[in-house]
Amino acid sequence: MNAANSVTSSALAPQTSSTRSIADALAHHSTHNLKRYYDHWARHYDADVEAEAYCGPAMVVDLLDAVAQQANVGHDSHVLDACCGTGLVGRTLHERGYRQISGCDLSAPMIDQAHASQAYQHLYSQIDLTQPLPRELLQRFDAVVCCGAFIPGHLPASALRGLLAMTRPGGVVVLSIREAYYDTAGFEPLLQALWREQGLSVLQTRMSARYLQNARAHYLALHVA
Ligand SMILES: C[S@@+](CC[C@H](N)C(=O)[O-])C[C@H]1O[C@@H](n2cnc3c(N)ncnc32)[C@H](O)[C@@H]1O
């Protein structure tokens, strides 16, 4: 286990529910405020989203499993969990047998929680997917998954370019996009542009599928040419 940047003992603090929620997180309009929100939410996040019946992580890993053979991804493949948060996706990947899991996120306290899960080999803190990415992460991963971050106030559709840039040629990107956000944030024209520019293709989708008790999401598996 090699966690980059800060990993503190706060990860071991007991988790109880708080008054924060994904619905409240949508209201942030700057990366600075959003980071602060998650920094303070980290210790209570898992309990709070469980209370919202959040099933995005299981849905994303289900879709990765469904396309794994087609995308030549196996349990020894290098998988990056982008916007890993506290590690719900990493833990699910680990339970399903994946063993080379890395994670990155904007919030160091969220990364601390992911570190405590022991699901990840490498963790990268304070990575902002709306900014240029560190060279060491480029074209490095066989699969990049991103769950729960393409939602209002979080990642713009253009951040998909960063996910693709971290994927090796021939690899796969699996992501969730909150349903209402998909329609308003310009995903359709972006996917068409990426198909023309880079030969990006859609392997499989789960449209308008389960996500939270009060919201649905689209799940896409994309093949990087
Ligand atoms: C709703 S949580 C989802 C966490 C985890 N993937 C899950 O499904 O439980 C959104 C995560 O995105 C991260 N995030 C938000 N904006 C980001 C950005 N610009 N770059 C990287 N991470 C970001 C937050 O820190 C937070 O951990």
Image (cartoon, rainbow, N blue to C red):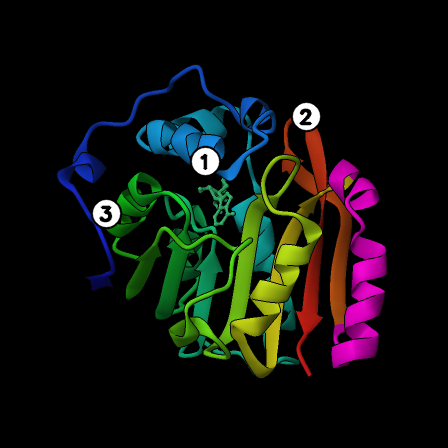
Horizontal and vertical percent position of residue 202: 77, 69
Q: Earlier in the sequence, mark 1 or mark 2?
A: 1
Q: Earlier in the sequence, mark 3 or mark 2?
A: 3
- Main secondary-structure element of the magenta-colored stretch: helix
Whether residue 37 is visible to the viewer of this picture, yes or no, is: yes
In the image, 149: left or right of 81? right
Mark 1 to mark 2 CA distance (whole Å): 27 Å
Disc 2 secondary structure class: loop
Q: Which residue is mark 1?
A: 32
Q: Quadrant of the C terminus?
A: bottom right
Disc 3 secondary structure class: helix
In the image, 3: left or right of 37? left
In the image, 214: left or right of 124? right
- Mark 3: C-beta under 8 Å from nearest atom of ligand 1: no
Q: Is residue 183 magenta?
A: yes
Q: Is residue 138 magenta?
A: no
Whether residue 120 is visible to the viewer of this picture, yes or no, is: no
Residue at position x 62%, y 56% in the image: 159
Within-10-Å neighbours for mark 2: few <14, some 14–19, many 20+: few
Is 122 located above or below residue 149 in the figure?
below
Horizontal and vertical percent position of residue 131: 52, 57
Q: Residues in magenta?
A: 180-201
